[in-house]
Image: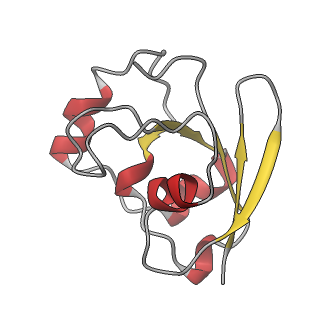
Amino acid sequence: MPNITYISHTGESRTVTADAGVSVMQAAVRNGVPGIVADCGGECQCATCHVYVDEKFLGLLKPAEEDEDAMLTLTASERKPNSRLSCQIAITDKLDGLIVTTPEIQQ
């Protein structure tokens, strides 16, 4: 089972083990990780699961689809080149060790 590390905007780190196939957002919510609001429950409709993906993992992710890209324009915190919605990142074994940072504001 892959390990995902969530780093808060203040630098606090929390690593959780997640099943392959669930989203980075689902793993955060199931494990009580702060900083992931997930108001829409993973439907790519609210942008409250915005994260910054560690640069070394970006090439392992599928590119953002049009709906995710549109939602990323609505994030409460600055959109960066490594911004993604965690509900759209499916955990796979190759993402073991994935590091994401939560922004200061989600809503």
Residue, far right: 12
Task: Give the residue drawn at x 54%, y 62%.
Answer: 27
Q: Quadrant of residue 12?
A: top right
Give the percent coordinates (x, y) of residue 30: 54, 60
Is residue 59 shown above or below 11?
below
84 or 58: nearer the viewer: 84
Task: Give the residue drawn at x 28%, y 22%.
Answer: 73
**With 85 as the anchor, is 24 left or right in this view?**
right
Give the percent coordinates (x, y) of residue 21: 43, 78
Give the percent coordinates (x, y) of residue 2: 66, 77
- Quarter of the image with the C terminus in it: top left
Give the percent coordinates (x, y) of residue 78: 48, 15
Task: Give the residue drawn at x 42%, y 67%.
Answer: 90
Is residue 10 shown above or below 36?
above
Task: Give the residue drawn at x 50%, y 71%.
Answer: 91
Is residue 104 shown above or below 27?
above
